[in-house]
Amino acid sequence: MTRQLEPLAANGAGARPAPSSPEPTLELNRKGRKREAKLRRDARRPPESHERFKILLAVIDEQRHVVDLEDHRARYAMLIAGAINAAIFFVGSRAAMSGWLPAPWAISIGLAYLTVSGLFILGVIDCLRPRVLDRKGLLHWEGAMRFGLDEYEMAWQDVRMDQLTREAAQVAHVLARMIDEKCRVNRRLYRWLPALTVLGGVVLTILAASS
């Protein structure tokens, strides 16, 4: 006896789902192709004026961090030299109180140490000294001081985007020159630091043995 098929429920329970429409998938693919094409166009096109200005501001911010880093390196080298000098002063004062007189060769070593130490201190001063840059424009604090308050406000009302971009490029170039100078000085400092440490160790050994 054949089994009769039961009729479908009124609410559609147990019914086979209808095939999904391909339109949402096609729409997603179309949007993805448009997005990829936009990214390719953006990769090849030159930046606009406001985009160049933002890029230059990011470059300036990075360069200021590098300037601070080079100053920290100079201060760290000065701390090392200061610690050596403090140790020599402490041990040398004890040797002087004991009535010790250095031999001529010991005096020569001490003079060599003083010479290298003096050059080292001059190098640190050269790295940390303020730079006179004589910069003009609205983005430079030196340029802002050339205006009165009313003139400065009027200059900002009349400013153009290409002028700001040009001034930001000038700031980045000035900072690049400053970084180059500080890097050259710090490379020289860290070439002198090993010689200063070795001479300081020799002087400390002589003073410690004499005291």
Image: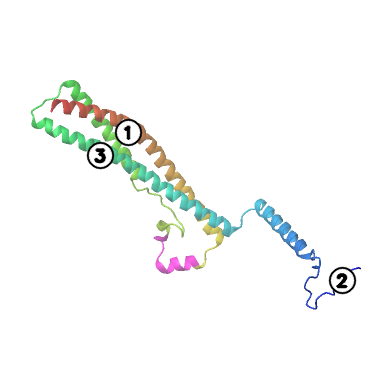
The residue indicated by pointer 2 is 5
The residue indicated by pointer 3 is 82
Total tally of numbered discs in the picture: 3
The residue lying at 27 percent from left, 37 percent from top is 81
Provide the residue span drawn in magenta. 144-156
Earlier in the chain: of badge 2 and badge 3, it is: 2
Earlier in the chain: of badge 1 and badge 3, it is: 3
- What is the magenta segment's predominant secondary structure? helix
The residue indicated by pointer 1 is 193
Between disc 2 and disc 1, the foreground one is 2
The residue lying at 50 percent from left, 54 percent from top is 58
- Tell me the kind of residue under disc 2: Leu
The residue lying at 29 percent from left, 31 percent from top is 197
**Residue 146 position within the rendered picture, expressed as x and y whole percent measured from the top left:** 40, 60
Between disc 2 and disc 3, the foreground one is 2
Q: Secondary structure at mark 1?
A: helix
Q: Identify the mark at residue 53; answer none if there is no mark.
A: none
Left or right, residue 67 beside residue 75: right
- Tell me the kind of residue under disc 1: Leu
Q: Secondary structure at mark 3?
A: helix
Tag 1–tag 3 contact (CB < 8 Å): no
**Residue 206 position within the rendered picture, expressed as x and y whole percent measured from the top left:** 19, 26
* Quarter residue 153 falls in: bottom left
Please say whether residue 33 is one of the residues in the magenta stretch: no
The front one of 68 and 185 is 68
Q: CA distance from mark 1 to mark 3?
A: 11 Å
Quadrant in the picture for the N terminus: bottom right
